[in-house]
Amino acid sequence: MRVEHGQLAIETPGAGLTDITAQAASWLAATRLVAGTLTLFCRHTSAGLLISENADPAVRRDLLRWLGRIAPEGDHYEHDCEGPDDMPAHIKAMLTGSALTVPFAGGRMLLGTWQAIYLAEHRARNHRREIAVTAMGA
């Protein structure tokens, strides 16, 4: 059993979903581990991680609209230190989650045919996000 730690730096263009599957796969391949689990952890409170469909962009648009309805921007939040998208971003990050675990075998993640890993940026402006990655296996 071996454990490898690293970090992915992801530049986001602002609110939306950024596919980070290729970056995660590349990092995993560099570890030369064959089978085990890959954990990804978003080190931020206004962004999150999720696995979703990668074929139809309408899925991502629908998800973003749903999140916008659940946590709309506005002046009705007490916490608004960084603007009207501040507290809604924290709520959306809580809903999308901060960590994922993906099994791998043959040196490749065992994602389904239509699955991809997305960084969900919940702030309106662009950010540089850090994703801690840990692979455990042989």
Image: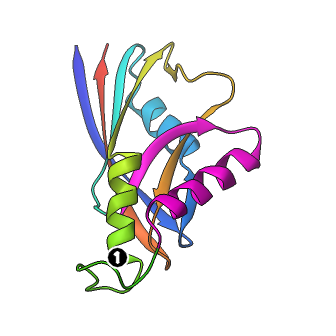
Q: Residue at x 36, y 56 (%)?
A: 93
Q: Is residue 55 visible?
A: yes
Give the quadrant of residue 75. bottom left
In this rendering, the count of numbered labels is: 1
Which one is nearer the viewer's eye here, 88 or 23?
A: 88
Which one is nearer the viewer's eye here, 74 or 103?
A: 74
**Magenta part of the protein: which range?**
46-72
Which one is nearer the viewer's eye here, 97 or 107?
A: 97
Which quadrant: the C terminus?
top left
Say if 84 sits above or below 130 in the image.
Answer: below
Residue 45 % position (x, y): 28, 61
Instruction: Inspect the magenta stretch and tell me whether residue 61 lies in it.
Output: yes
Q: Residue at x 68, y 39 (%)?
A: 54
Q: Residue at x 23, y 80 (%)?
A: 78
Which one is nearer the viewer's eye here, 109 or 29?
A: 109
Which quadrant: the N terminus?
top left
The single residue placed furthest to the front in the displayed view is 76
Residue 81 % position (x, y): 25, 86
Q: Is residue 116 left or right of residue 137?
A: right
Report helix, strand or loop for mark 1: helix
Residue 49 % position (x, y): 42, 46
Residue 39 % position (x, y): 33, 33
Instruction: Inspect the magenta stretch and tell me whether residue 80 lies in it.
Output: no
Give the quadrant of residue 3. top left
Residue highlighted by disc 1: 86
Q: Is residue 58 left or right of residue 120?
A: right
Say if 30 sits above or below 132 in the image.
Answer: above
